Image (cartoon, grey):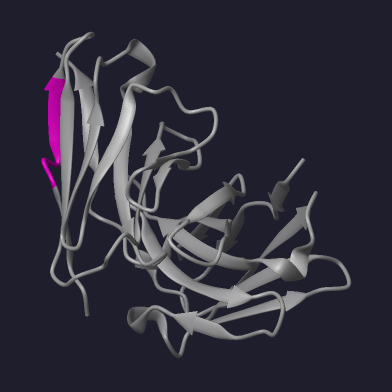
Amino acid sequence: QVQLVQSGPEVKKPGASVKVSCKASGYTFSSYGVSWVRQAPGQGLEWIGWISASNGDTKYAHKLQGRVTMTTDTSTSTAYMELRRLRSDDTAVYYCARLVAGPFGFDYWGQGTLVTASS
Amino acid sequence: DIQLTQSPSFLSASVGDRVTITCRASQDITSYLVWYQQKPGKAPKRLIYAASTLQSGVPSRFSGSGSGTEFTLTISSLQPEDFATYYCQQFNTLFGGGTKVEIK
């Protein structure tokens, strides 16, 4: 069965970087994209960006361009999302999700990773 | 950038009620509209994709309609397990602000 398993919670100081991993199983990793979404406490869903697992193409939300980098390791079927120069308002649960090309959205999601940016 | 406006942001309803949530896009997004349900502490769950196609395993009381700029999610008879927050999403990117459905 398809599973996306994310790395554990992180606590970082403002200005630091965080890298969250998302290990996929149960499907051909390179046949789908991986999207990242975050949710601040008590807030709605915010799209961060996506990466093609077949060719590494990326697209990031304007708001986070310059601070976010998404990568994949096809040898381990793992996607990564790195966010730099953390601010307190980056505190959120970060989700990875499998992206199906076309008008299909995200059909499988990771369990979420809480990233806390606090001094 | 395309804007996505979801309404209402909060809805109070009783078990058995018919519930309708609307999502409006600022530009034509054809059928690139997906609906999700999220319960507290859980990841979102896809309910409807391509504006009107029901995800396998999702009860038939959920339905989606619309194309272009106006879309609707309807729950024909609200059940206790449907109390949650619902989000629309366009072009696999921007999400609507969410609709929290609570018990009246």
- The percent coordinates of residue A98 (x first, y second) are 60, 58
Q: In the picture provided, is A52 more to the left or to the right than A106?
A: right
- The percent coordinates of residue A96 (x first, y second) are 58, 58
In this picture, is B41 found above or below A56?
Answer: above
- The percent coordinates of residue A63 (x first, y second) are 33, 80
Q: In the picture provided, is B68 more to the left or to the right than A12?
A: left
Closer to the camera, B67 or A68? B67
Q: Residue at x 34, y 44 (%)?
A: B52
Q: In the picture provided, is A41 more to the left or to the right than A57?
A: left
Closer to the camera, B91 or B85? B91
- The percent coordinates of residue A21 (x first, y second) are 69, 64
Q: Quadrant of the N terminus of chain A?
A: top right
Q: Main secondary structure of the magenta part?
A: strand
In this picture, is B103 found above or below B57?
Answer: above
| Stretch of the chain drawn in magenta | B7-12
**Residue B9 magenta:** yes
In this picture, is A102 found above or below B22?
Answer: below
